[in-house]
Amino acid sequence: MYNLLANTVIAVHFLFIVFVVCGGLFVICWPRMAFVHLPAIAWGAAVEIFGWICPLTPLENYLRQLADGGSYSGDFIAQYLLPIIYPENMTATMQQILGGLVITINIIFYALAIRRRSRLHVQ
């Protein structure tokens, strides 16, 4: 049961990361999504730039410990998602670059959203 919960935390963590990076695409179609997405960007970028630990990481580790240190072998989430969320050899500089990329990507998405919205109001 604890392995299932830990895997669920990993899946949620991965989906949150995808939302932080690509959620601006939703804002282009649904501008009110910005109220949810902007705080997510702020959190995701801050975690990367300042080297903080996301609370989902200790939660996942705790659940793995409760599962008697459950093995990752053969597990889809551990095989494919863990290396994306927790890459080996991640340096502070790499984390800061990733945080900057999150901000840059979303500036582009939000510029597109603003441009689209202004075109709709002009017509």
Image (spheres, rainbow, N blue to C red):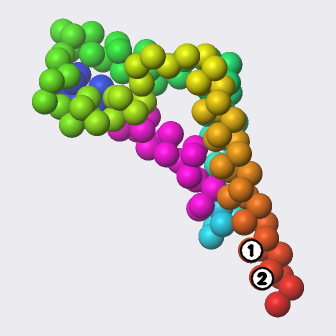
> How far, Cα to Cα, is label 2 from label 1?
6 Å
Task: Say whether residue 24 is magenta.
Answer: yes
Q: Residue furthest left?
A: 74
Please report the bounds of the magenta region as a residue range.
11-26
Task: Say whether residue 60 is magenta.
Answer: no
110 w.r.t. 65: above or below: below
Q: Residue placed at 68% from the left, 50% from the top?
A: 106
**Residue 87 point in image, percent of width and height:** 42, 24
The answer to whether residue 7 is left or right of residue 32 is: left
Query: Which mark is drawn over residue 116?
Result: 1
The answer to whether residue 4 is left or right of residue 100 is: left
Number of numbered discs present?
A: 2
19 w.r.t. 11: above or below: below
**Residue 73 point in image, percent of width and height:** 15, 24
Asked if the residue at tag 1 contacts the one at tag 2, i.e. Cβ–Cβ closer than 8 Å, the answer is yes
Which is the main secondary structure of the residues drawn in magenta? helix
Q: Residue placed at 40% from the left, 33% from the top?
A: 84
6 w.r.t. 69: above or below: below
Q: What secondary structure is marked by label 1? A: helix
Hey, which quadrant is residue 71 in on the image?
A: top left
Query: Which mark is drawn over residue 22?
Result: none
Task: Please identify the quadrant where the C terminus is shown.
Answer: bottom right
Q: Residue placed at 55% from the left, 16% from the top?
A: 91
At label 1, which amino acid type do we have?
Arg
Question: Which residue is the site of mark 2?
Answer: 120
